[in-house]
Amino acid sequence: MLMDDDRISTGQAMALVINAILGVSLTILPRDVAKTAGPDCWILVILGGVFAFIAALIIAAVITRFNGKTFTEYTSFVLGRPAGFLAGALYAFYFVLVCAVVLRNFAEVMKNFVLETTPREFVIITLLLLSFYLIRHGLEPMVRFMVINFPIWFITAIVALILTLNKVDFSELLPSFRTPPDKILFGSVSAAISMAGFEVLMVAGQGLKTTRHVYKIAAVSIGIVTAFYIYLVVIVVSMLGVDETRRLLWPTFAVLRSITVPGGVLERIEAPIIIVWVIMVFTTLSAYYFSATITFANLFKAKEFKIFAPLLFPWIYFLSMMPQNVLELENWLKFAGNLAVVFGLIIPFILLIAGSVKARWGKSK
């Protein structure tokens, strides 16, 4: 359970959501949208942002109904104790699974681009240990780190992409509006899945100082992420071309490795950029790891959530090691994305409707 002084402000909640969303997805999003819509890939990101915003608004509406309850207490109140406990357990499993796929994808990228001879087990355990250390200090210290880190990685990412402008060819985004509507719809949903992360506020929302500005949190955080993803996709596809973006496993890193600084001031500019990306993945992992520990603490009505951090550690590690290769990891990522629709949209929508019906039924008695 959270302590009374372990509370976060509206601005800190925005930082939590943004850091939960950005991380692994930015390495593969340009490839996924380019495969589906070609030059119209940027349209998918815009519509995906709209869908993600709608899902965030539904979650925000649920959070405003908590009235001092935790997520598991609210689900038990609305759905009944057995169904509420089951919903909380499923969310805990989902958070653990996301931690695992984030870790494994991170390890694969690092092994292919930076640490070719380093065992992936070492990479996974190192990042997981750092996340374990951070979340044990509580919600507010963890989010404070994210607030400090946010301008660093955001400015670095924007500057890095600006350095590629001399190599981009915006004609790669032409012709536009040629993609069939069904592909646009399907691709937009996939892009929205890449913006999953607001669901961590379902459990971390109990740490908000006030829920009055939760809709503002949804609007600002999803807006920033959507704008950043549009910028990223346009730059990557314009630089590599649609066909090359489709072919590469991690096209964003191919772009980063090609960056050069005028005058040869820095020969390996991708090194500091990769360090910043590591921090972004670290904060994404920490957000979901913390959400898993809080969910378990609420399920078992524990007075202290810290005990669950070491208990979940080996499960996250073993799950991250289960994919046998990159292709199998891709299937895990798709499975986690499908679950994001369930836990980020469907279940919150059910809770919102059920909560509204129960509230009206209670007033009519």
Image (cartoon, rainbow, N blue to C red):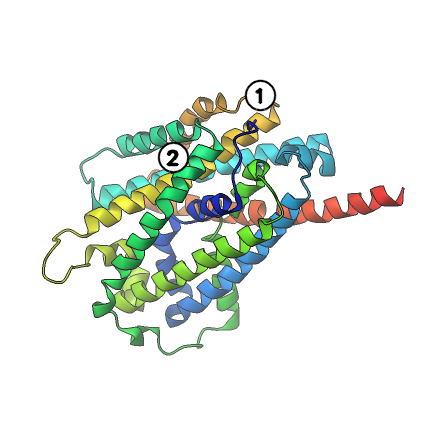
**Quadrant location of residue 179?**
bottom left
Q: CA distance from mark 1 to mark 2?
A: 29 Å
Residue 300 image point, x, y percent: 60, 23
- Horizontal side of residue 196 vs 321, given as left or right: right
Residue closest to the far left: 264
Identity of the residue drawn at 66% across and 34% down: 69
> Looking at the image, can residue 96 be seen?
no
Q: Which quadrant holds the C terminus? A: top right
Q: Amino acid at mark 2?
A: Ser
Please name whichever residue, 347 or 281, is drawn nearer the observer in this view of the structure. Answer: 281
Residue 100 image point, x, y percent: 41, 36
Residue 351 image point, x, y percent: 68, 44
Question: For the residue labelled by badge 1, is the local secondary structure a helix, a strand or a loop?
Answer: loop
> Looking at the image, can residue 84 be seen?
yes
Q: Which residue is mark 1?
A: 303
In the figure, 260 relative to 271: above or below?
below
Disc 1 crowd rating (10 Å Cα; few below 14, some 14-19, many 20+) is few
Question: For the residue labelled by badge 2, is the local secondary structure a helix, a strand or a loop?
Answer: helix
Q: Which residue is mark 2?
A: 320
Identity of the residue drawn at 15% across and 51% down: 268
- Horizontal side of residue 351 vs 342, given as left or right: right
Disc 2 crowd rating (10 Å Cα; few below 14, some 14-19, many 20+) is many
Residue closest to the far right: 365
**Quadrant location of residue 35?**
bottom left
Q: Nearer the viewer, mark 1 or mark 2?
A: 1
Q: Amino acid at mark 1?
A: Lys
Identity of the residue drawn at 43% across and 43% down: 332
In the figure, 276 relative to 48: above or below?
above
Please name whichever residue, 296 or 166, is drawn nearer the observer in this view of the structure. Answer: 166
Count of number-bearing discs:
2
